[in-house]
Amino acid sequence: MDQSRADILASIAAEVRACKLCRLYQNTTNGVPGAGDPNAEIMFIGEGPGFHEDRQGLPFVGRSGDYLEKLLAMINLQRAQVFIANVVKHRPPENRDPLPDEMAACKPYLDKQVDVIDPLIIVTLGRFSMGRYFPGGKITQIHGKPKFDDRRAYYPLFHPAAVLRNPNLEKEMEADFKRLPEILAQVKALRAKSAPKPDSNQEPPPLPKQLSLF
Ligand code: SF4
């Protein structure tokens, strides 16, 4: 029987909460698998849970979460309409950067979430999620510049926490964010174009027996 997207995401979340594949689960309160609409068109990927995220088991709560919600409201979206996840699902001690072996251990969870949700846009927030899709990219040079493949757009943005630390980035962040609806429309047009068309050379299907004329 086909599992629904929500069911598959719930089983990934259960695996994350019980996971001990890397050292990061130690001394945490909760795993933070990610949250949001299983059918989201836009998926945000941040770095890792912080203090408040660890306490609540939810991504992007606290000040960064409030700011992200403010940005979403600018394009008439609420957090429940998007999906938000992180590169690592347990909080690194003292909010240090996640290490390469930790990101590698955690990668299958995020890969599976992306496969299941199949978002039209993946928005990377910060340099570790950006590194997944823009290896070697520099955020100051590539923020707000989408990259397309045949399924979706990848859109690198500053991390909300970085903007809160440096309010000079606010204008650029807001301008980048406001482009999301336009990029969404571009991906929808691309997917519609690449959707298989009915083959005009194909034989028409045979009439069902009971409608056959002879
Ligand atoms: S960070 Fe990822 S790989 Fe490491 S223990 Fe948590 S869920 Fe497992």
Image: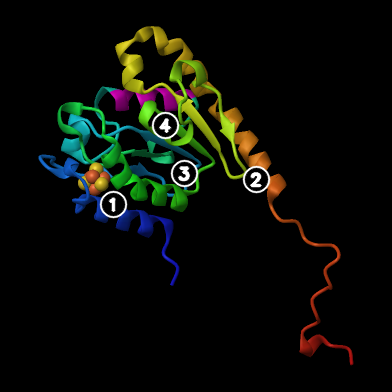
Q: CA distance from mark 4 to mark 3?
A: 22 Å
For marks 2 and 3 on the same chain, the one whose residue lies earlier in the sequence: 3
Q: Residues within 10 Å of mark 2 (few under 14, many from 20)?
A: some
For marks 3 and 1 on the same chain, the one whose residue lies earlier in the sequence: 1
Residue 195 vertical position relative to residue 175 in the rendered view, above or below: below
Residues rendered magenta in the picture: 64-74
Label 4 CB less than 8 angstroms from ligand 1 = no
The secondary structure type at the circle numbered 4 is helix
Q: Position of residue 171 (x, y in %)?
A: 46, 11
For marks 4 and 2 on the same chain, the one whose residue lies earlier in the sequence: 4
For marks 4 and 3 on the same chain, the one whose residue lies earlier in the sequence: 3
What's the residue type where badge 3 is placed?
Answer: Ala
What's the residue type where badge 4 is placed?
Answer: Gly
The residue singled out by tag 1 in the image is: 13
What's the residue type where badge 2 is placed?
Answer: Arg
Q: Nearer the viewer, mark 3 or mark 1?
A: 1
The secondary structure type at the circle numbered 2 is helix
The residue shown at (45%, 20%) is: 138
The image's mark for residue 40 is 3
The image's mark for residue 131 is 4
Q: CA distance from mark 3 to mark 1?
A: 17 Å
Q: Nearer the viewer, mark 4 or mark 2?
A: 4
The residue singled out by tag 2 in the image is: 191
Q: How many marks?
A: 4
The secondary structure type at the circle numbered 1 is helix
Which sits in the foreground, 16 or 138? 138
Residue 26 vertical position relative to residue 67 in the rendered view, above or below: below
